[in-house]
Image (cartoon, coloured by chain):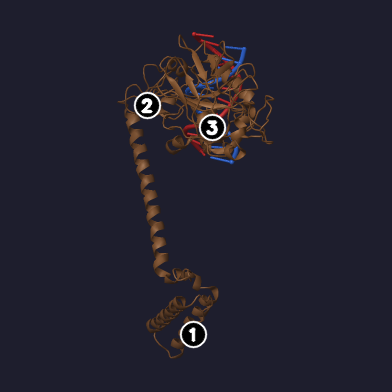
Chain colours: A brown, B blue, C red
DNA sequence: GAGTTTGAAACT
DNA sequence: CAGTTTCAAACTC
């Protein structure tokens, strides 16, 4: 929209009475001059997505979602002058970190007439550009937006909102989708919709290791999937079910990535058609141990007794509840089988910890031994003692010992004395080796 | 590592 | 909605 005249967008389907969002352009990435007004409370432009001038991020405090708006102007006087201050170098800058503890989920918003559903544009090896001629801006609400929050936060990921009187459509994506984009290695988002790229600016986003945001990765390392037939576009695929891209997975023919944006969007829609809550967490958000932490649908186990990881309740370390339809359930508080399992699990965990501690201690001792026995290491020599006991040294030592044995035999010494003589010679050999090791780095030591 | 079991998801 | 099939993870050997 023009710099001087805020553009008004009507969100007729998601907002009630206060449904006007006025967007004024941002002149500089470092100067938050863009303001979005939603029924009084204001979004403040924080800064533009470093990777693209067409993405705005909207934070709704307390919401499980964070929102991204792809802003497109329809005229030549749009804010598309982003290129004037968005250089290639800025595109490769680290994406913004906006209170990441709260950023959860995003709603990318794009021009409805150009896309039906909003997901980041696919990557291409040619490094094409994401999107439109216009600017993308990250915006955050200065105050909570109760009037829209219930609507947006209740939307399942992948939901596509039809445009209202404005020219924008909206989609809700799983949280990981955006955090992936924000927090991992850069990848290039490229347009597949034929938007021109007058500036040559690349839009990049970050995909996290293993498909997790940084914070999540620390607490919940995701296992790579091994899907073969589902293209990772069905809920069989854990990555897809969790709203994550496949990354570092072992899947074949994977479509759960930016390169298959269209198929992925269709798959998300299909899942949501079948079950609008398909992407919502199955386990309640209550703290561990609290009664509200339960499986939303309950399990249907028949043969596992709900005491194996086949059972989603057991896997989530929660008891089965009245919502479960399991047969022969043993996953309840007083179950002796469950208690036994828990004790075994605890014992196993203790063993693992002990083993880890033992390994750590051993490593430490070896390291310490290395340090103490090789004083030359600090003075530049730095070789372990055994490196001095080369094959030649060993052979020479053995010759010395044999010679001593022959001497003892020659003078007809009793066996005990002969053994003693040999041992003494061995001691002298050792002393010579040690002495030589301490004096020189020369690898060849002769007895 | 191959084969089997299991139960959720998908399909009919 | 119930029954069946498909699928990938969990599990066993």
Picture quadrant of residue A251: top right
> Which residue shows up at 67% across the image and 26% down it?
A192
Which residue has dot 3 on it? A28
Answer yes or no: is residue A307 visible: no
Q: Chain of mark 3?
A: A
Answer yes or no: is residue A382 visible: yes
Which residue has dot 1 on it? A403
Residue B2 falls left or right of residue A242? right
Q: Chain of mark 2?
A: A
Q: Which residue occupies the extreme left position in the image?
A: A334
Which residue has dot 2 on it? A318
The secondary element bearing badge 3 is classed as: loop
Above or below, A288 relative to A93 = above
Q: CA distance from mark 3 to mark 1?
A: 88 Å
Mark 1, Cα crowd under 10 Å, few <14 / some 14-19 / many 20+, is: some
Total marks in image = 3
Q: Residue A389: give x, y in percent of width and height.
A: 50, 73
Say yes or no: labels 1 and 2 on the same chain: yes
Q: Residue A139: give x, y in percent of width and height.
A: 49, 26
Q: Earlier in the sequence, mark 1 or mark 2?
A: 2
Q: Earlier in the sequence, mark 3 or mark 2?
A: 3
The secondary element bearing badge 2 is classed as: loop
Mark 3, Cα crowd under 10 Å, few <14 / some 14-19 / many 20+, is: some
Depth check, front residue: A284 or A353: A284
Mark 2, Cα crowd under 10 Å, few <14 / some 14-19 / many 20+, is: many
Q: CA distance from mark 1 to mark 2?
A: 74 Å
Give the label on residue A159, or none: none
Picture quadrant of residue A376: bottom left
Q: Earlier in the sequence, mark 3 or mark 1?
A: 3
Frontmost of labels 1 and 2 is 2
Q: CA distance from mark 3 to mark 2?
A: 50 Å
């Amino acid at each position: 929209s023009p710099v001087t005249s805020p553009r008004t967008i009507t969100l007729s389907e998601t907002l009630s009475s206060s449904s006007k969002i006025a967007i004024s352009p941002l002149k500089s990435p470092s100067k938050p001059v863009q303001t979005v007004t939603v029924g009084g409370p204001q979004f403040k432009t924080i800064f533009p997505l470093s990777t693209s001038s067409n993405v705005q991020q909207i934070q709704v405090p307390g919401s499980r979602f964070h929102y991204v708006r792809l802003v497109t102007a329809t005229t030549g006087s749009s804010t598309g002058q982003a290129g004037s201050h968005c250089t290639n170098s800025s595109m490769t800058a680290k994406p913004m970190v906006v209170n990441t503890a709260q950023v959860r989920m995003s709603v990318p918003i794009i021009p409805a007439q150009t896309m039906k559903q909003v997901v980041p544009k696919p990557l291409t090896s040619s490094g094409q550009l994401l999107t439109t001629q216009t600017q993308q801006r990250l915006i955050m609400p200065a105050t909570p937006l109760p009037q829209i929050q219930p609507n947006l936060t209740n939307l399942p990921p992948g939901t596509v909102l039809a445009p209202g009187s404005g020219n924008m459509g909206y989609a809700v994506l799983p949280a990981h989708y955006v955090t992936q984009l924000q927090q991992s290695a850069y990848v290039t988002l490229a347009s597949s919709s034929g938007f021109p790229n007058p500036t040559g600016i690349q839009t990049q986003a970050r995909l996290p290791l293993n498909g997790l945001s940084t914070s999540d990765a620390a607490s919940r390392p995701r296992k790579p999937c091994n899907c073969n037939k589902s293209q990772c576009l069905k809920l069989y695929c854990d990555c897809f079910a969790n709203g994550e891209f496949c990354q570092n997975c072992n899947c074949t023919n994977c479509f759960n990535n930016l390169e298959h944006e269209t198929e992925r969007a269709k798959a998300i829609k299909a899942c949501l058609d079948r079950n609008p809550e398909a992407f919502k967490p199955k386990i309640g958000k209550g703290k561990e141990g609290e009664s509200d932490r339960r499986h939303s649908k309950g399990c249907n186990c028949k043969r596992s007794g709900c005491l194996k990881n086949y059972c989603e309740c057991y896997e989530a370390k929660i008891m089965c509840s009245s919502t479960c339809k399991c047969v022969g359930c043993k996953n309840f508080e007083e179950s002796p089988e469950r208690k036994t399992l828990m004790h075994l699990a605890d014992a196993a965990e203790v063993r693992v910890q002990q083993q880890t501690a033992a390994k750590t201690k051993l490593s430490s001792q070896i390291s310490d031994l290395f340090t103490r026995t090789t004083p030359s290491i600090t003075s530049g020599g730095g070789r372990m003692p055994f490196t001095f006991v080369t094959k030649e040294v060993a052979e020479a030592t053995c010759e010395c010992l044999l010679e001593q044995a022959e001497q003892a035999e020659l003078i007809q010494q009793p066996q005990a004395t002969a053994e003693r003589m040999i041992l003494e010679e061995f001691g002298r050999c050792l002393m010579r080796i040690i002495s030589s090791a301490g004096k020189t780095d020369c690898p060849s030591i002769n007895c």
